[in-house]
Amino acid sequence: MSMNLFFQAFPVDDIKSMMNTHSLIDKWVYGGERAVIDIDIEDAWDVLNNILGGTGFESDEFVDDVLSNGCEVLFSETVKRHAAALSEWTHERLLDALRQLDPDDGSYHFEHFRDQNEDLLEEFDKLCAFYQQAAQAGLGVIEYAA
């Protein structure tokens, strides 16, 4: 079974409420009604994280007592920084970085994305669009694996 990575963007006040009352994270993430934007970058998350050096994945806080595996929380300023950094990446640059990855470093599903570049580019485009929308709207993000 593959582990996917999910992102949900919420208004700043909702992020603050979830940080104050962790049980709201489960309720609002699983409920799905409060998230303004959400994506799933499927199992491309580890390869993208390694290529991008954490851009789009590094968070402000980790909450371990929620969801199945905990979650990462990104405040709106961090979302804006990630959006700006991701906007500097092109498909060509991403594929060049993919070719530079060591196949033995243990990246999750590396072989698939090495052979299926279009699949990786599709997930990268989703990630970039998500961050651009979230940054423009001044949203915070909950990121979690499931």
Image (cartoon, grey):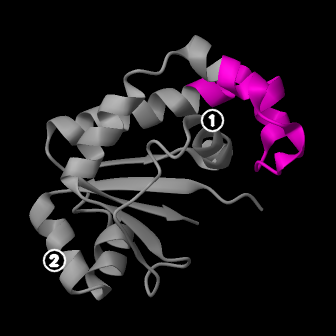
Would you say 17 lies left or right of 46 here? left
Between label 1 and label 2, give the one nearer the viewer: 1
Residue at the (26%, 81%) spot, across then down: 24
Asked if the residue at tag 2 contacts the one at tag 1, i.e. Cβ–Cβ closer than 8 Å, the answer is no
- In the rendered structure, does residue 32 fall within the stretch colored magenta? no
Q: Which mark is residue 51?
A: 1
Would you say 33 lies left or right of 129 here? left
Quadrant for the N terminus in the image: bottom right
Q: Quadrant of residue 132?
A: top left
Q: Secondary structure at mark 2?
A: helix
Q: Which residue is mark 2?
A: 17
State the image coordinates of residue 6 (x, y, percent, origin top left). 48, 55
Along the line of sight, the residue nearer the viewer: 61 or 16: 61
Taking the view exactly as shown, the residue that stands out farthest to the left is: 13
Magenta span: 96-121
State the image coordinates of residue 87 (x, y, percent, origin top left). 37, 23
Q: Quadrant of residue 63?
A: bottom left
Q: Judge the density around disc 1: few (<14), some (14-19), many (≥20) Cα neighbours within 10 Å.
A: many
Image height of 82 relative to 23, above or below: above
Residue at the (24%, 78%) spot, across then down: 19
The kind of residue on which mark 2 rests is Ser
Image height of 130 relative to 122, above or below: below
Taking the view exactly as shown, the residue that stands out farthest to the top is: 92
The kind of residue on which mark 1 rests is Ile
Q: Disc 1 to disc 2, how far (Cα)?
A: 33 Å
Total numbered labels: 2
Residue 87 visible in the shown view: yes
Taking the view exactly as shown, the residue that stands out farthest to the right is: 104
State the image coordinates of residue 47 (x, y, percent, origin top left). 68, 41
State the image coordinates of residue 27 (x, y, percent, origin top left). 31, 79
Would you say 125 lies left or right of 130 here? right
